Image: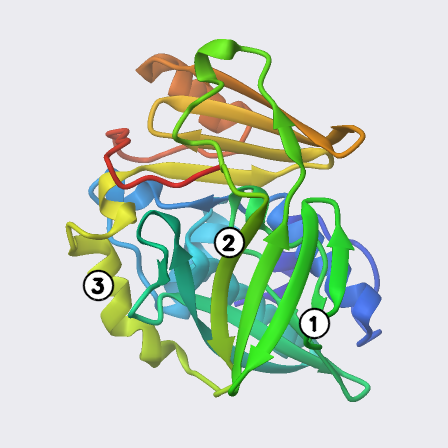
Amino acid sequence: MDIEAYFERIGYKNTRNKLDLETVTEILQHQMRTVPFENLSMHCGEPMDLDLEAIYDLIVRKRRGGWCLQINHLLYWALTTMGFETTMLGGYVYITPVNKYSSKMIHLLVQVTISGKSYIVDAAFGSSYQMWEPLELISGKDQPQMPGIFRLKEKNGAWYLEQIRREQYVPNQEFANSELLEKNKYRKIHFFTLKPRTINDFEHVNTYLQTSQTSVFVSTSLCSLQTLEGVHCLIGFTFTCRKFNYKDNVDLVEFKNLDKEEIEEVLKTVFGISLENQLVPKHGDLSFTI
């Protein structure tokens, strides 16, 4: 695997030698704006593989995306290869419909330590919950970013991530009450511990997420990509564009329902994705919010 090819894939052309917060931030932002958070492979009849070589081939050579177990695994490899002090961590995602955290460790994220300070780096939560900058590992501190205000809270060795969100304006009233819209201003996202993990710790859950009928990834096809102004999402047949803070403390959210031909075009032009096999879009009862 070639780190220079990874840099070319994410469009990163700046320094490779400064192991500082600015460099980590730039790598995070370049990756999240070029590598979609998506599960389209499994809705094309293809497996979501955790092998690092396979992930590199998918994302770097085939210019695809993936889910957190793939995208953040690649990010962990890249930052480690650059010389950063990194630790792979595991998280438990908050499930809004049932008001509780997942019982399984289903989220992979990265801890980076720079000059004695630790930061959480995550390029693969997707939608409007995606951090745009590393979060300092400090409890109770508001950390404002473009997508909203993030806050970490430590309790008994567990770190809980929350987001304070803006209001949202939907011009098309047909979608004003869409189930895809996040209704909560204060949003729990996930919690994690600082126990070091390896990719082998996620093998079982990687299978579960692709096969269980209780997995949202099985019932819903999704693709999400951050932009300079907000985020684009494709959930099933529904395409959404969110512009952060388009008015004071208000996000603009626009919706469009697509047909199959339009989906293929949007994947190519908006997300930079060309699929090898036929996609079967799904939007089941278990769904993401955008």
Tell me if 59 is positioned left or right of 102 in this view. right
**Residue at point 24% right, 53% down?**
47
Q: Earlier in the sequence, mark 3 or mark 1?
A: 1
Question: Can you tell which mark lies on residue 140?
Answer: 1
* Residue at which label 3 appears: 207
* Residue at which label 2 appears: 125
Tell me if 34 is positioned left or right of 16 in this view. left
The x, y position of residue 254, in whole percent, is 56, 19
- Callout 3: 10 Å neighbours few (<14), some, many (20+)? some
- Label 2 is placed on what type of residue? Phe
What is the C-alpha distance between the residues marked 3 and 1? 35 Å
- The residue mark sitting in front, 2 or 3, is 2
- Label 3 is placed on what type of residue? Thr
The x, y position of residue 274, in whole percent, is 42, 32
Q: Which quadrant would residue 236 be assigned to in this image?
A: top left
- Label 1 is placed on what type of residue? Gly
